[in-house]
Image (tube, rainbow, N blue to C red):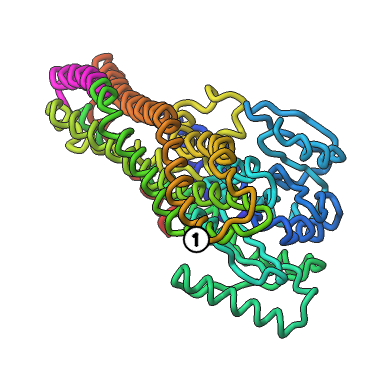
């Protein structure tokens, strides 16, 4: 276990002890998440970059399929296990236990599965835990599998290993788009130059320098390229260690832990005000919260009626315009591809790649903004219509809004823990519903659109089956292909986007409802205790004060040092 993981786990264990017998609401599943979370490191690059060979060398065994054609069609997580076995996950979340020897065959039947987990007895994997390497489908694998793997792991990857071979020696447009998508999800990457044993040292140095210049120009900061011999396991291990898993784990959880502490202190302050209040004031507060629930329902229904013209319609227009703009920006490159012998296939792959990158970045940005607007709108409405609550907590609506928005943004790593550790979604509670819905906004729009693109693009670009003059190709791209893509997107997007926006609205509303009900319960509980004279007002206040001081001291020791 990492030092940071141990520290946070110890914090939660002590917090659990402190909270025993308390009426305050807190996430009891958090401790399990800290203990079981793994940091996924997807390894991406062209199929010819030697990713699987590099990983086999690191593992000390030839277990991942390699060849002159793409062999990895399914993303394969590499987990340490004393008893080797293959875990094949279907699209519906169900699993199949298979022997390790079935790996190559499963990749041939990739349509049946979402991704794989390979459990093998490798000391190298044990040594890097909780880092988990993921062998990703290369850029040359099937479009559908490549896109699905990226959509699944982009929000889940704690850090990415980007591999290009010394034979390629450049950062392609496709790779730059992938790197841009990684940055969109606030992740980072290490850039590896593979197969360096195939070139002289001075050539490797020259290629490394050229790649670093490209990356510096694109990302406006110095970035190091790590040259690796595909036959050296030690060098790859050093690359992984340099990633600093302690920092990754810290960044993954620290904000949530601090937010939880702040929320508990806020609840204590709220409960203290309940104890100080008269029964009449507390009864009025409960009535106010019941009114807030009614207001919430009205607000949700009103927003639901406005979803199409306020959010869905404008969002679809911005998505289509953004894709069209990117396609026009790549017009020269696309026109050159029409002069190749496999023009239709090359065009399809490039266009889908442009669409994937654009959709990923646009959807993430747009949905972050829309979710923030929905949360703020509900919070403002509740605050304006429920002045009674100010006596208990002058920021009660804002506190609920901040808590909801924090959950909506926590879509990396933690979502993986929830979705993988709980067999059923019900087991994860409301946190699963909220967090999985914001993650699904990207994947549940991105995947169907790209699948449709793979279907309709061959018809749109079929006239490129023979060589075309570049100028003629430019004309056809601008006047036929691009408008055709916009038309198909205009037909496909409304149903997909509407469904996801409705899901987002429902989950935001559900989270507000949950928080309001928690406050109702808190008021009722402390008021009832006082009426039954289980404790004097001074005793109740003293107990709450002591709990507050203990929580602050605990946070100071573990979270703010």
Q: Position of residue 286 (x, y in %)?
A: 21, 19
Q: Looking at the picture, tell me which residue is in the foreground, 371 or 29.
A: 371
- Horizontal relation, residue 429 to residue 279: left or right: right
Magenta stretch prevailing secondary structure: helix
Residue at (22%, 34%) from the top-left corner? Answer: 377
Residue extending farthest to the top is 532
Is residue 278 on the magenta stretch?
A: yes
Locate residue 28, reporting x and y percent: 49, 32
Q: Residues within 10 Å of mark 1 (few under 14, many from 20)?
A: few
Q: Nearer the viewer, residue 119 or 186?
A: 186
The reply, left or right, for residue 241 in relation to residue 27 is right
Residue 25 shows in the view: no
Given residues 484 and 25, the one toward you in this image is: 484
Instruction: Look at the picture and state if 238 lies above or below 293.
Output: below
Residue at image point 53% right, 22% down: 426
Please state the horizontal and vertical placement of residue 498, each as a whole percent of the image.
Answer: 38, 28
- Return the residue found at the far bottom: 202
Badge 1 marks a residue whose secondary structure is: helix
- The quarter of the rendered structure image containing the C terminus is bottom left
Q: Which region of the structure is painted magenta?
A: 277-300
Residue 392 in magenta stretch? no
Pointer 1 residue: 471
Please state the horizontal and vertical placement of residue 304, each as a whole percent of the image. 29, 24
Q: Residue at x 56, y 61 (%)?
A: 336
Residue 295 in the image: above or below residue 45: above
Q: How many marks?
A: 1
């Amino acid at each position: 276990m990492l030092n940071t993981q141990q520290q946070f786990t110890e914090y939660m264990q002590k917090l659990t002890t402190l909270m025993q017998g308390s009426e305050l609401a807190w996430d009891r599943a958090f401790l399990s998440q800290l203990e079981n979370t793994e940091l996924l490191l997807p390894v991406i690059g062209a199929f010819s970059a030697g990713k699987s060979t590099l990983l086999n060398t690191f593992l000390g065994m030839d277990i991942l399929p390699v060849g002159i054609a793409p062999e990895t069609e399914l993303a394969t997580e590499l987990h340490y296990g004393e008893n080797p076995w293959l875990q094949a996950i279907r699209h519906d979340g169900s699993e199949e236990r298979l022997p390790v020897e079935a790996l190559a065959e499963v990749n041939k039947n990739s349509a049946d599965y979402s991704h794989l987990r390979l459990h093998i007895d490798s000391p190298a994997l044990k040594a890097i835990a909780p880092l988990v390497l993921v062998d990703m489908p290369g850029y040359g694998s099937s479009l559908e599998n490549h896109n699905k793997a990226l959509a699944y792991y982009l929000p889940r990857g704690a850090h990415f290993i980007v591999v290009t071979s010394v034979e390629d020696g450049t950062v392609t447009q496709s790779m730059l788009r992938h790197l841009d998508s990684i940055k969109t999800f606030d992740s980072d990457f290490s850039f590896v130059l593979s197969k360096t044993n195939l070139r002289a040292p001075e050539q490797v140095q020259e290629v490394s320098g050229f790649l670093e210049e490209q990356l510096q120009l694109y990302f406006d900061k110095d970035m190091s390229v790590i040259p690796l011999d595909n036959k050296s396991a030690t060098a790859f291990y050093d690359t992984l260690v340099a990633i600093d898993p302690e920092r990754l784990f810290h960044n993954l959880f620290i904000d949530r832990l601090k937010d939880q502490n702040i929320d508990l202190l806020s609840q204590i302050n709220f409960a203290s005000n309940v104890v100080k209040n008269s029964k009449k004031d507390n009864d009025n507060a409960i009535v106010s919260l019941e009114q807030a629930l009614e207001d919430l329902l009205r607000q949700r229904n009103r927003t639901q009626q406005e979803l199409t013209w306020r959010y869905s319609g404008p969002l679809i227009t911005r998505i289509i315009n953004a894709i069209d703009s990117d396609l026009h920006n790549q017009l020269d490159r696309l026109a050159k591809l029409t002069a190749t012998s496999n023009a239709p296939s090359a065009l399809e792959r490039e266009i889908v790649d442009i669409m994937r990158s654009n959709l990923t970045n646009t959807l993430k940005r747009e949905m972050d903004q829309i979710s923030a607007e929905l949360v703020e709108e509900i919070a403002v409405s509740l605050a304006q219509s429920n002045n009674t609550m100010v006596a208990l907590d002058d920021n009660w609506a804002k506190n609920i809004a901040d808590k909801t928005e924090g959950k909506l943004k926590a879509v990396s790593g933690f979502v993986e823990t929830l979705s993988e550790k709980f067999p059923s979604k019900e087991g994860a509670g409301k946190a699963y519903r909220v967090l999985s819905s914001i993650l699904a906004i990207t994947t549940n729009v991105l995947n169907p659109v790209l699948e449709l693109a793979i279907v309709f693009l061959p018809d749109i670009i079929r006239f490129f089956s023979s060589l075309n003059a570049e100028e003629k190709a430019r004309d056809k791209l601008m006047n036929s292909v691009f408008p055709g893509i916009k038309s198909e997107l205009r037909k496909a997007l409304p149903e997909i986007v509407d469904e996801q926006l409705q899901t987002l609205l429902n989950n935001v509303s559900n989270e507000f409802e949950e928080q309001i009900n928690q406050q109702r319960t808190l008021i009722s509980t402390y008021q009832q205790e006082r009426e039954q004279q289980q404790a004097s007002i001074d005793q109740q206040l003293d107990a709450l004060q002591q709990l507050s001081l203990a929580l602050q001291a605990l946070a100071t020791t573990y979270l703010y040092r």
